[in-house]
Structures are given as C-alpha cells and as structure tokens.
Amino acid sequence: MIELCSARLAGDDRRGWIIPIGGAEKKIRSSAILSRFVELCGAGAARIVIIPTASQLHDTGERYVKVFGRMGAGKLDVINFATRSDCEDPGHLNLLQQATGIFFTGGNQQRLADIIGGTSSAQQIRDGNLRGVHVAGTSAGAAFLCRQMIRVGKTGTTPRGGMVSLTDGLGLSDAVIIDQHFRERDRLGRLLTALSRNPSATGLGVDEDTAAFIDPDNRIEVVGSGGLTVVDTANMTQSMLAAVRNGKPVGLIGVNLHILLSGDRYDLTTRDAWAKSDQDRRSASQ
Amino acid sequence: MIELCSARLAGDDRRGWIIPIGGAEKKIRSSAILSRFVELCGAGAARIVIIPTASQLHDTGERYVKVFGRMGAGKLDVINFATRSDCEDPGHLNLLQQATGIFFTGGNQQRLADIIGGTSSAQQIRDGNLRGVHVAGTSAGAAFLCRQMIRVGKTGTTPRGGMVSLTDGLGLSDAVIIDQHFRERDRLGRLLTALSRNPSATGLGVDEDTAAFIDPDNRIEVVGSGGLTVVDTANMTQSMLAAVRNGKPVGLIGVNLHILLSGDRYDLTTRDAWAKSDQDRRSASQ
C-alpha cells in the first residue's frame, strides 16, 4: 500500500507525488488509480484543481468533477486555461495556491506546452509540488509533467533517427521522460530514441489504465491493469544518434529494461526494481 | 572484417557459422550479406545447397541459384524437400554431405519444422555444421535454425501471455532464439515472451536486410542495413509468465537490451557488446 502523506502538507515541505497515467484509466467508483489519487490529496479534505486544457471537448473538466466527486473528493474546481494570459489570472493562481492536488486531463500535450508552459500558473504548480501538492496527469497530461516532453513521434519497437520530437514540459522532474498509451501504440522505439539524447533520465512507458505513483523520494509504485516499462540507460555505453539520419536505425548498447505490473516498485535513485511477489515473500518471512 | 574460415573445413572440425538473416536481404551483386556467405563457403570452391521448402513459390530455389551464381559460387544445388520421405533420400543426403554451405529461403517456418524436423536430412545438416559447414537462413529460414523456433506470434512492443507459440527448430544452437522482420513487424513483445520461458537463451531480433554472422566461438558480427536487437535475460530476476493469462502483460525485471548496427559485435558467451566505432578507436590507438 502507498503511504498516505496528506499530513506532509502541514509543514515538513516534502515534495508532492507525481503521477503519470497512461490514458484510458477506469473512471468508475472502483478505479484503483483515480481513487488512490483522491485519497492522496486528502479525500474529503482534498481540494483538487482539474485542468482540461489539453482536451478540446467542452465537457472534459466536468466529467472529472463527477468522477472525483463520486470518489469523495472534498472540493473540485476546473480551470480551463485557453490562453497564456489566462495563466496569469490572479483568481486562477489563488485556486492553484490552495490546491492539495492538480489533475491534467488528456488531449494534445502540445496545447499544454503552448498555453501553460513558462507562465505564472506553471510556476505555481511547480512550487506547489515542491511544498507537497500532488500532481497527476493522464495521457497528454502525463507526458507534460516532466521537463523533457515527448511532443510527437512515430510508432514502432526499435529506435530510429528523427523518430521523436521533444520540447519543454511542465518541469516537475528531470529524472524521467514519460510516454503514454505505451503498449497500445508500440512506443518503445520513440522512448529509446528520446533517451538516446537524454541518457541521464529514466524512461517510463505507461500503458493505458496504468499509473506510476512517484513518491517524494523518487520511488515508484505501479497501479493499474497494464504494465510500466522502465528504460534505464545509466549503463548505456553507446548511443549512435548523433550520426544517424532520419529513418535509419539507432544503435544502443547496454539498455536495462523492466516491465513492471501493479504493485511492483522501482527506485529512480538506486535504479533497483522489485516485483510485488518478492515484496510479499519478504513481508511473509519477517 | 570477418575472418574467412573455409580452411577450417579441412580437418580441425570447428563448427561452421550460423547466419540468421532478417528477410528481404538485398540480392544484387553488391549484397553485403549474401556475398559474405558465398565467400565464407569458399567462393569459387563453394558447394552450396539451397533449400526452398519454406516457400511455396515454384521459382524460389532457382532465384537464389542465379543470385549466388552471380556472386561467384562454384557449385549450386536446390533440394526442395516436399515430404518427410524426401528427407531420407540418399541422393539428397549425399548432396548435403558434400556441401560447404546450406541456405534456407524464406516462406513459412512451420513447413520447415513439419517436413524437415527430426529427419535424416536435419541430422545431416546438424552434423555438417559441427564439422564446419556454414548454415544460413533468411526470414522463416532464420527462425528455423535454432532449437526453439518461434512458430507464430502477435505484434507489439511489450510481452503478453499467449503472445507467442514455440516449437522445435533445426537445433543448430540452443544459445539463441531468433526472430526476423524484427523492427518492420514490431516483434520485441513476442521475443520477450519467448525468452520469459527460456531465459538461458539470448534473443536475436534480426531486422530486414540484416544478418547475425555467428562464428564458431559464438561471437556475432552484424552485417546489413538494419539493426540486430540483442535481448539478454541472463540477469532477469523476475518473469511472471507462469501466472499470466492470455493477453495480460508479462512482468520482467532486469532485461539487458542492445541494438547493434552493421560492424557491431556481440559475444554470446561473455554477453559483451562492442560498437564498431569502439573497435575502430581501439584499432587506431594500437
């Protein structure tokens, strides 16, 4: 079980959790991912701001208000930033300031970067996360969370030159690069290509209805029905991207790959992975 | 450069090379893969037997006769095994006995297993390879070379239960499991699924127009325009396949992945990979 840490908001200034979700997460009452987010944010005491800017459907924000409301979230607000000047609005900044959790919906991540990136609201969210505000995003909202955001890319297993285009994301973490709908859209190749340029980051490929709950100490627990593909390039001795033309294969030597399922854990600092079954065995023998 | 070892045929009984090709290899005079195979087999002194059994096109064998002939191969024979009793024919066994190289064309690998597997011809080819006869196969012919053959499987990056079906191949090597058309058909998932059952083998995912030249000491050199994906599961601490239902993700911890390009090398015994550029640097500094 994830340790609930809403108490941490009080004063010890631990970073909030960062929660990329792979998209298409279950939204009924039993949803493991969304209900755990609501719990983390304080359940009845939660004040969650929903940001549907990535989506161009008019009811995306209200849909999540209903979902989180059914799960018992205390206070719910939607801020649909439509322009960069919206992101400087004192009312909006005030809502973000008071939030215990912030949720980015899916849609087009380029809209998030274009409208929110570099604004006072982006700064407010980063500052909030450092104080303990939890920030989740699904699909495009997941991609946006980290510093280097995958903007667009091509499908396929193996990396190729020109396969992926990166831009600046929200910047909550530079320890990870996130890709979503991972298994469903065969995105290992574009994540490997992204990492071949940024080997100090760890790649997180998040399947649909699956989330990486990244705690304040950069330890991940997987929640959901799919897998989390962790791509660790710390020991990569060779990346030939610089010399590669568009469409040509990229050579990589020494990539460490884990495919983690619900309950499995990964430590982004030590780069160790544990299967849930091992943890259960350890607990049983204690 | 690959050291030519046709001299080894004389008497020191070194194993012949094993050469899986990913399919769709260039067949013109400049073909790096096929011309290197012809050279290995002895060029003008080569006696190559072409086995088009996987294919159901009538001219597949003759097509390779022309290709290898243009490359200067000395003697070329086609044996189109159509039934298991064909594989007991003394004339065919005699041709195989005298060969310096054997080439399996593409098509359907299940036909190779059904018609040739377990026959005297299969035994003759295995014995020949142990004495120094080089055995190459492209596409279905590549899959057939090793002991555990991928029979059929589903497309996609990440492993899932029921994604792949294995059967017995020719059995030249149990050190590797081979998959072909690798990048083009997004086959990492099925190769990982196959390895999760057979973690002592190394997975070789061979792209089109690409070959793994496996020498008598189980060292690989990559030749061709695509990539060779090497999947090393020696340090895999977790494989959850046993508990996984069809279609559900398979958890794997500790997979080591290399994507090697033409001129790169891999040692199947020590599990070390070297990029061509590193080898060039080493040579230059000597």
Image: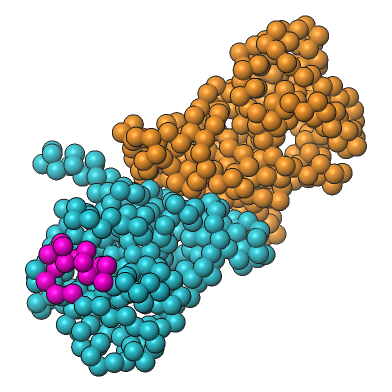
Chain colours: A cyan, B orange
Magenta stretch, main secondary structure, is helix
Q: Is residue B156 magenta?
A: no
- Is B151 left, or right, of B221 in this rendering? left
**Residue B78 at x, y = what percent?**
82, 22
**Residue A56 at x, y = what percent?**
40, 74
Which one is nearer the viewer's eye here, A10 or A242?
A10
The residue positioned 21% from the left and 45% from the top of the image is: A279
Above or below for B104 versus A171 = above
Which one is nearer the viewer's eye here, A106 or A204?
A106
Which one is nearer the viewer's eye here, B58 or A178?
B58
**Residue B257 at x, y = what percent?**
49, 48
The residue positioned 81% from the left and 41% from the top of the image is: B27
The residue positioned 37% from the left and 92% from the top of the image is: A85
- Is A165 left, or right, of A117 in this rendering? right
**Residue farthest front in this picture:** A58
The residue positioned 48% from the left and 60% from the top of the image is: A191
One can see residue A77 in this view:
yes
Tell me where the magenta segment starts and ends, as one range: A62-76
**Residue B39 at x, y = what percent?**
82, 36
Q: Is residue A70 magenta?
A: yes
